Image (cartoon, rainbow, N blue to C red):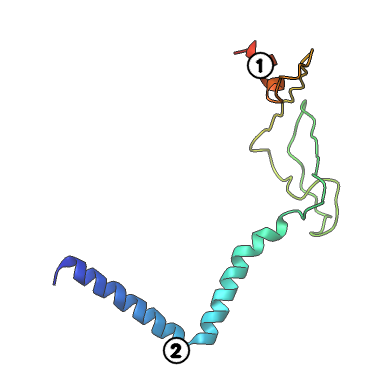
Amino acid sequence: MTLTERLREKISQAFYSHGLLCASYPVPIVLFTGLCILACCYPLLKLPLPGTGPVEFATPVKDYAPPPADPDHRPGEPSERPEWYVGAPVAYIQQIFVKTSVSPWHKNLLAVDVFRSPLARAF
């Protein structure tokens, strides 16, 4: 027997044993699979639903200190700070908006030219 044939036989035996296990204990297998799916989907409950606005929370740049633990706050109750704001920050996000206009606007210009024209000077 060559290596390929032995490997094919082992894989076939593994699939057969798995099928035999599933056929012998269908209810526990289905329950275990359902629990695994629910456990994998649990983090999705923390995602905001469509239509909810963004949560904006600002901290002072000068004299920053990590937020103190709030011993009176119970989980699920609204508080002054968002529930994701615990400990020191691990990253900073900076947004830069570029607002441009092209004057005079000719009829042969495309919408892409609004960005291309002012940025051409920088590059």
User: In terms of depth relative to the viewer, which is nearer, 120 or 87?
Assistant: 120
Q: In the figure, 6 relative to 47: above or below?
A: below
Q: Residue furthest front?
A: 107
Using the rendered view, name the quadrant where residue 41 is placed.
bottom right
Q: In this view, does 54 lie to the left or right of 89?
A: right
Check disc 1 and report the residue beneath it: 119
Q: Which residue is drawn at 54% across and 77% down?
A: 32
The local secondary structure at tag 2 comes to helix
Using the rendered view, name the quadrant where residue 98 is placed.
top right
Specify the label residue 98 is tagged with: none
Q: Which residue is drawn at 82% across and 51% down?
A: 52
Using the rendered view, name the quadrant where residue 109 is placed.
top right
Circle count: 2
- Disc 2 residue type (three-letter): Ser
Q: Residue furthest left?
A: 1
Question: Disc 1 vs disc 2: Cβ atoms closer than 8 Å?
Answer: no
- The percent position of residue 118, horizontal first and vertical second, equals 70, 15
Q: Is residue 23 left or right of residue 56?
A: left
Between marks 1 and 2 in the image, the one whose residue lies nearer the viewer: 1
Specify the label residue 24 is tagged with: 2
- The percent position of residue 61, horizontal first and vertical second, equals 76, 27
- Disc 1 residue type (three-letter): Leu
**Quadrant including the C terminus:** top right
Q: Is residue 71 left or right of residue 117?
A: right
Q: Residue at x 20, y 66 (%)?
A: 4
Find the distance from the CA under tag 1 to the CA under tag 2. 68 Å
Answer few, some or many: residues within 10 Å of disc 1's Cα (few below 14, many 20 plus, some between 14 and 19).
few
User: In terms of depth relative to the viewer, which is nearer, 7 or 28?
Assistant: 7
The local secondary structure at tag 1 comes to helix
Mark earlier in primary sequence (1, 2): 2
Q: In this view, does 42 lie to the left or right of 29?
A: right
**Quadrant including the N terminus:** bottom left
